[in-house]
Image (cartoon, rainbow, N blue to C red):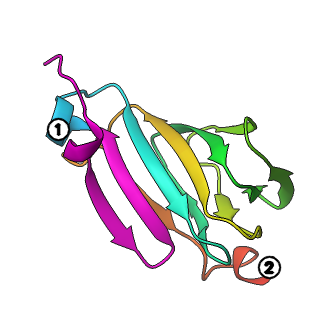
Amino acid sequence: MSTFVKQADIAVDNLDWGDIGWRARPANTGCKTFVVMDVSLEPGFGHDFHKHPDQDEMIIVKAGQIEQWIGEEHTMLAVGDSVYLDADVVHASFNVGSETAHLQVVLAPAVGDEGYQLVDVSAEQPWASLR
């Protein structure tokens, strides 16, 4: 169902590592081919090591900077930088800057009713020892 998505209509989940604004997912747009999220990470916080077994992902830095991990490699990403992640690749994003980091995240395809599938591996090795 084609629809306008106004900022005031975006459902926001407040998590211990940041906020997710659900811009497009099956629940609000009916889209089953992709999910779009607005993610905020406060300084000192991050989305710890995880993977999306059946979803490719693109993360675009819109404000601030993040330490981005792909497997056991990492780099700093600033405004305008992005990272592409194949399905099932372990990754993490941490805000090591002094201002809130704002990210635009796209996952495809949408999986399940929420559109989003995640497996937390942050307590497993080698991920638990990397930072």
Q: Earlier in the sequence, mark 1 or mark 2?
A: 1
Q: Amino acid at mark 1?
A: Asn
**How far across and how far down the image is residue 94, in percent?**
69, 66
Q: Is residue 78 visible?
A: yes
**How far across and how far down the image is residue 58, in percent?**
59, 36
Q: Closer to us: mark 1 or mark 2? A: 1
For residue 57, what is the image quadrant?
top right
For residue 122, what is the image quadrant?
bottom right
**Residue at (41, 44) in percent of width and height:** 37
- Spatial distance from mark 1 to mark 2, Cα to Cα? 36 Å
**Residue at (62, 37) in percent of width and height:** 86
Q: Amino acid at mark 2?
A: Arg
SS class, disc 1: helix
Residue 85 magenta-highlighted: no
Using the image, determine if residue 70 lies above or below residue 125.
above
Which mark, by number, is residue 28?
Answer: 1
**Image quadrant where one finds the N terminus:** top left
Instruction: Please report the bounds of the magenta region as a residue range.
Output: 1-24
Residue neighbourhood size for the residue with mark 1, other residues' Cα within 10 Å, grouped as few (<14), some (14–19), many (≥20): some
